[in-house]
Amino acid sequence: MSAISLQGIVKRFGETEVCRDISLDIAKGEFMTLLGSSGCGKTTTLNMIAGLEHPTSGDILMDGARVNDLAPIARGIAMVFQNYALYPHMTVADNIGFSLRLKGMPRDEIARKVQPVAAALELSHVLGRFPAQLSGGQQQRVAIGRAIVREPKVFLFDEPFSNLDAALRLRMRGEVKELHGRLGVTSVFVTHDQEEAMSISDRIAVMRQGVIEQVGTPEEIYARPATTYVATFIGSPQVDVLAVERGSEGVRLGQVDIPLGEAARAALRRHDGAVDLAIRPEHVRLGDTGIASTVRLSQPIGYATIVTVDAPGGGMISVRVPGLVKLVPGEAVHMHLDPEQIMLFDRASGRRLATDPLVPEG
Amino acid sequence: MVRYVTSGATSVTERSLVGVGIVLFVLWNTAPLAWLVTSSLMHQQALTTTPPDFSPASFTLSNYTEVFNSAAQLGRGLLNSIIIAVGTTALSIVLGAPAAYALARLPLPGRDHLLLMVLAAQMFPAVVVVIPLFIAASKLGLIDTRISLILVYLTFNLPVVIWVLRGFFLGVPKGLERAAEVDGASTWQTFRLIVLPISLPALFAASVFAFIEAWNEFFFALIMTRQESQTVPLVISAFAGQYQTLFGQMMAAAAISIAPVVFLAILLRKTILSGFADGMLKG
């Protein structure tokens, strides 16, 4: 039985349809991330799981029971908000213990419950301080402490790290992942940061314009994106989607034949209609042979260099070259696209042509 | 105040211009007060010659002693004013704050119309409502009672208090209230335990406003009271007699009457200013 099950959720605010037929099952103990750009409906979906918003139609089930009409407190959820939402007039201890106080728990028992939580989050020495006196990372941990202390069945995270600087974000990401490993509580995490989603999740639901484009493990989503949108949204630098023609042994990019792997060729034979090609930067090799091209831009990022080159027939392709290489704009290069790693998409629908049995053709 | 000026103005010229502006503003506001206090300390004779005689011999505390000795009215007036102003203030906040919160956050049908209606009570000129109010008070046997004035002042203060507080409540980050909801707080608990405590500066500001309005009000007090419930402004006006106006005593009484308001302003100045300056949106 799923810990959380969304069944045909539709949410409208007036005329605006924010969520359109969302169905998603989240297993007990799973770390599920809702990933998408702003306005895709991910936070609204999270708020509906929390009970802060109510679906226009569709059902929300928790442990098999319909919870549509239950208040947040009755759903056994705890939530960490984007701006922390700490109560500014309460000390750290009071912030963490607020939900227990509302339950009518005696003061000494609250203190007994708050202490181990604070200790686990390295907040013991700031329990008497007010939120404004804390660093961003500490505020974030108080928000997490407030969620943990209730021993909820489900954790909900609404872009919890978006206000933190890059280094701290990385650290908090690790802490949340570690926390999830330790507590094993079902978690739903909302973010627009694909790298964050990839690094922290058991599974990711990529959302776009109120629908789920694809649900899968980070590996599945990265290696076998269901649509061009997912392909471009996941991964940095972005994959480049190029229009191609059908050729004798595969596809033609401008005047150049691009060989395909066996699976892609089979998929192309089954398919009729125009197709697009996409390839990840790490699956393109620069060398002395292959497709002739010209360097447009070279961006060293330390462990690699991102080289942007002209694609035959217009457009560009990003190439990830290991290490630091010196390439100047205008320099002539040759590239080789790994045939097994080329992804083909139906141009009209944007859906990927299935090359393996895991992703049925849409 | 200086804090905001220096942080905003950069060049020396700008800063001195702002400084001059502030000095003029302060002079404009304090000159009448200074004159009030000065004249309350002068003999009638020295005060009424042209130009006034500012020699040391002109100064005296006799006006104050006279006011306290001759006018038992002032003591009663002060007591009435305090009870009425405090009562008005307390009721304005107790009734206004929940109303403001409901109008800010709850999905009430016809909320906007309700808000306009609340404001409409403010729009009638006093002369239009004074006769109906007088008749109502008279039928209820409330003429010359403190309750009648408290009720009248409430009708004028509540709308303002509701609008001021509603504006502030709208600015309270919704995330805080959502967090409280997730923590298991009812709407009332959210209001009482989260929203009210962080709105203290606004509550203070609204209270000071309500207090001063009730404290200084003259017109309704004149109509609705006879003797027993007369407030300070009425008592002061009594120093202007038909044949002679006792300027010194009048000013002394006025000085005494504004003392509580000035004291209140000084007392709450820090709270009000710091609250508005810092904001609470950091949370």
Image: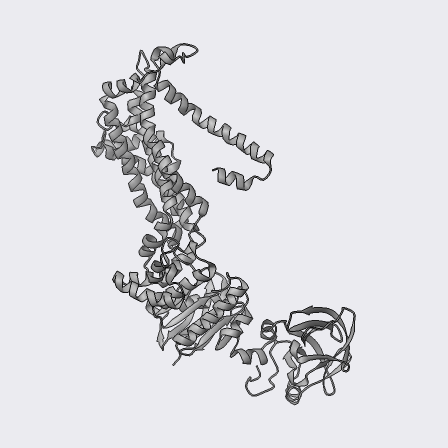
In this figure, what is the number of numbered marks?
A: 0
Residue B59 percent coordinates (x, y): 35, 15
Tell me: residue B191, above or below residue B1.
below
Quadrant occupied by the C terminus of chain A: bottom right
Tell me: residue A60, above or below residue B253.
below
Residue B146 percent coordinates (x, y): 24, 33
Res. B89 in view? yes
Tell me: residue A335, above or below residue B115.
below
Residue at figure coordinates x 30%, y 45% from the top left:
B94
Q: Is residue A310 left or right of residue A94?
A: right
Q: Residue B37 versus residue A259: which sits nearer the camera?
A: B37
Q: What's the image's color scheme?
A: one colour
Residue B147 percent coordinates (x, y): 24, 35
Using the rendered view, name the quadrant where residue B158 is placed. top left
Q: Residue furthest front?
A: A125
Residue at figure coordinates x 33%, y 36% from the top left:
B211
